[in-house]
Amino acid sequence: MARGFLDGDRVKAVIAMLLLLPSSAWAEPTNALVVNNCLQCHSDEMLAQQRLTPKQWAAVVKKMIGWGAPVEPENVEPLVAWLAAHYNLEQPAYVPPRLTTADAEAAFGPLPDGPYKGGSQKKGKALYAQACASCHGADGHGSPTGMNLADRLLSWRAAEFVQPVRVGRGRMPAFSTLSRADFAALLAYVRTL
Ligand code: HEC
Ligand code: HEC
C-alpha cells in the first residue's frame, strides 16, 4: 500500500480529511469546552483560523447552539471568553501547518488490522445500532451529539479507531466491556457505511 496510497484521488481525499477531521494529528491540544462542544462538527484548525471580537464569538456560540452544539448554559461565558482570548483580532494571521507526503501517510495511511481482523459485519451492525447509532447516526453520518463515522480513513486504522471508544473521549462514554471480537465486528460494519 505504501507506494500507491497518496496517488490520484487519495491526495484529494487526504486534503478533504485535513479540512474536515475533528482532530488531526498535529492540532494543538485545546480547551475541554471546545473539545466537548465544537469538535464533533469542526476541526481545531477551522476554529484557530478565526479572528473575531468577543461580541462576534458570543454570536457564533449562540448560533452554534442553534445548530446543535450541546453547550450547558453555565459554560457559554467561559467558552466565549476562551475563544476570544485565543482567536482574536490581535493574533497574527493563521499559518496553516505544513504537511509532507510522509507526514500525511503516517497520519492517515491504512494500518494493519492486527487483533481486529475479520470481524462479523452482521454482529457489528447489531452492536452499532444498539451502542453507537444514537450519537453517530443510524447511517453513521453523524448527529449533533457525534460526528460522522462513515467513509473515514480512520476506520482503516483499527487501533486508533478502537482506542477512544474503549476508554471514552469528550462526551463519548467508555465502552470498556466490548471485546476484541466486538470491536472487530464494529469496524467491519462501519467500513460498509
Ligand atoms: C452540530 C454541529 C456543530 C457544532 C457542535 C458546532 N458547529 Fe459551528 N458550524 C456548524 C455549521 C453547520 C456551520 C455553518 C453555518 C452556516 O453556514 O451558517 C458552522 C459554522 C461555524 C463557524 C463559521 C462562522 C459562522 O458563523 O457560520 C464558526 C466560527 C463556528 N461554526 C464555530 C463553532 C464553535 C466555536 C463551536 C462550539 C461552541 C461550534 N461551531 C459547534 C455546525 C456546528
Ligand atoms: C453519547 C454519544 C456517543 C455514543 C453513544 C458513541 N459516541 Fe463515539 N463519539 C461521540 C463524541 C461526542 C465523539 C467526539 C469526542 C471528542 O473528541 O470530544 C466521539 C468520537 C468517536 C470516535 C473518534 C472519531 C475521531 O474522529 O477521532 C470514534 C471512532 C467513535 N466515536 C466511535 C463510536 C462507536 C464505535 C460507538 C459505539 C460503540 C460510539 N462511538 C458511541 C459520541 C458518542
Image (tube, rainbow, N blue to C red):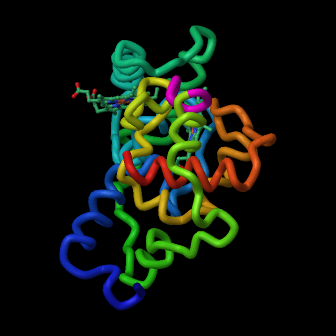
Taking depth in this image into account, of 7 and 46 the one nearest to the observer is 7
| Residue for point 45% across, 37% down | 147
Q: Nearer the viewer, residue 84 or 127?
A: 127
> Residue 72: percent from the left, percent from the top?
59, 13
Image coords of residue 119 (percent x, y): 59, 57
97 with respect to 134 (left or right): left
Secondary structure mostly taken by the magenta-highlighted segment of the chain: helix
Where in the image, quadrant-wise, is ligand 2 located?
Answer: top right
35 relative to 99, above or below: above
Farthest residue, direction right: 177
Q: Is residue 178 left or right of residue 122?
A: right
Is 25 inside the magenta-drawn segment? Answer: no
The N terminus is located in which quarter? bottom left
Residue 123, quarter of the rendered image: top right
- Quadrant hosting residue 116: bottom right
**Magenta stretch in the rendered image:** 130-135
Q: Residue at (71%, 40%) from the top-left corner?
A: 168
Q: Residue at x 35, y 62 (%)?
A: 95
Residue 150 vs residue 99, the one in the foreground = 150
Residue at 65% across, 51% down: 183
In the rendered image, is residue 60 in sight? yes
Question: In the rendered view, would you say 88 is above or below 19?
Answer: above
